[in-house]
Image (cartoon, grey):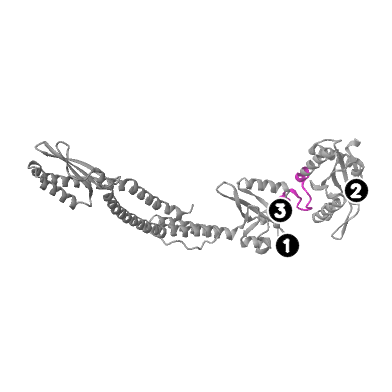
Amino acid sequence: MSIKFKLAIPPLLGLMLVIAFIQVFWQPQQLASAKIKYENHINELLDITAVVMVPHILEKDLGSLFSTLEMLEKNYANHWYNITFFNQNNRKIYPLFRNDTDTAKLNSEFIQINYPIKLTGEPLGFIVFEADWGKEKTLILKNISAIQNVIIYMIILIIAISTLSQFQLIYRPLKKLSRAANKIENGDFNTELPRLTKDELGELTKSFSAMQQELAFKNKTLDHHAIISMTDIDGVITYVNDNFIKISGYTEKEIIGSTHNLVSSNRYSPEFYQNMWQSLKQGDVWHGEICNLTKSGVEYWVNSTIVPFLNNQGKPERYLSIKTDITKQKLAQEKLKHLANHDALTSLPTRRLCLENLTKALSMAKRDNSIVGIMFIDLDGFKAVNDTLGHDAGDLLLIGVSERLLKCTREMDTVARVGGDEFIIILSRAYHRDNVEAVATKIIDTLTEPFNLNEQTAQIGASIGIALYPNNGHGAEELIKCADEMMYAVKRKGKNNFSFFDDI
């Protein structure tokens, strides 16, 4: 129901109540009052007539008596139908020759008054007065109706003026505020508000203006720093700001009407998006970090907050997404994580990451009933190279060893540097001891080949201890310890060779 109709209801109800009051209470009251006045007037006439008639009755002067009654009847012929006089013996004296059957047919609304004529309390006779109240009532009703119409017209005029004033002073400013609210909802913060007045509407407009300025400031600040998009209930994008266009590389025309799949990096499973939408459709705010993809294929990270806008039934009708670009922070985190888990010289995983990868490899082997080979490698002759050729040459040698070890393994395997010249290799899904042995042989052959270090040649070897899961243990630390023991056993037997823990 519109406020215009709501403003019109009270005056209309007031008019209906006034009309009902006039019809039900005032008009009958006026009519009853008029009837009483009419009867009182008749009684006053009869009082005067009785005073004149008493001497004629006492003197038995019928001529004068008849003349008095005829004159009264003639003068007031328009007000009553009939006058009849009876003596004290109840004998009709006047009129002499008019029978009751000759009496004019009376209206159903008439007044019959039996007026006694007395002298000092002694009855001399009585007058039967038959008055035409119906005719008088019609005249009175006309007067009442005229007054009633004037009252109703005056009330209608007052209501019309009041209603127009309400529309002008209340409805129009409220309508203007409503239009302004709709424009602000759609992002137009420059809409004109009603002029300020010194009343409640003026206070409302003043408060609304303050909120408009606050929202405009926050929106400008947010729009300047954040990546903003708006979607409908189905996730179709209906609005994006300049930051969204700038970071995604798409034009506004390409974005509007599409979904956020346009910038999806395909890093996430369908379950990830299903859980997100389930949360949003319940009316909950979703928050998380997402990796997106620009039009040119470059990944960028955003910290995203998605807010559902709920209708009166508490159901989402659209969604607002506010994102901040955290690509630099994520790259810095990745770099720190890489530095924490990788050797600065060779970029190989450190012991910490090696243990994590070994734990994962063991879990995978348990599921598919495969074996995992763990090689603990210590370089033979590294200290001599480092002492004779210098630390720079030693560093180059370690880098060269790392490169050769990587070439001897698969992408799924792990090659880690866990000490000065110590390395660990994790062979995932080896399935057979022979596969592990083949890799160990390849490593020995590869590392015994000369290394060219800044136009100098270095020759080294490697002692390799090998442990197998599940034969030699089930825990990561346990298996590494077994491989380490076998590496020292190889060194004691002459170095530059490999041996399995099973061979003990």
Q: Is residue 241 above or below residue 473?
A: below
User: What amino acid is at disc 1?
Assistant: Ser
Residue 28 disc label: none
Which residue is nearer to you in this view: 320 or 290? 320
Left or right: 426 in relation to 318:
right
> Residue under circle 1?
296
Q: Which residue is depicted at the point 88% across and 41% down?
A: 431
Q: Is residue 354 magenta?
A: yes
Which residue in the protein does label 2 denote? 444
Q: CA distance from mark 1 to mark 2?
A: 45 Å
Instruction: Point out the tag, 1 or 2, that comes first from the N-terminus.
Output: 1
- What's the residue type where badge 2 is placed? Ile
| Label 3 secondary element | helix
Element class at badge 1: loop
> In this rendering, is residue 338 above or below 430?
below
Q: Quadrant of residue 110?
A: top left
* Badge 1 vs badge 3, beta-carbon distance below 8 Å: no
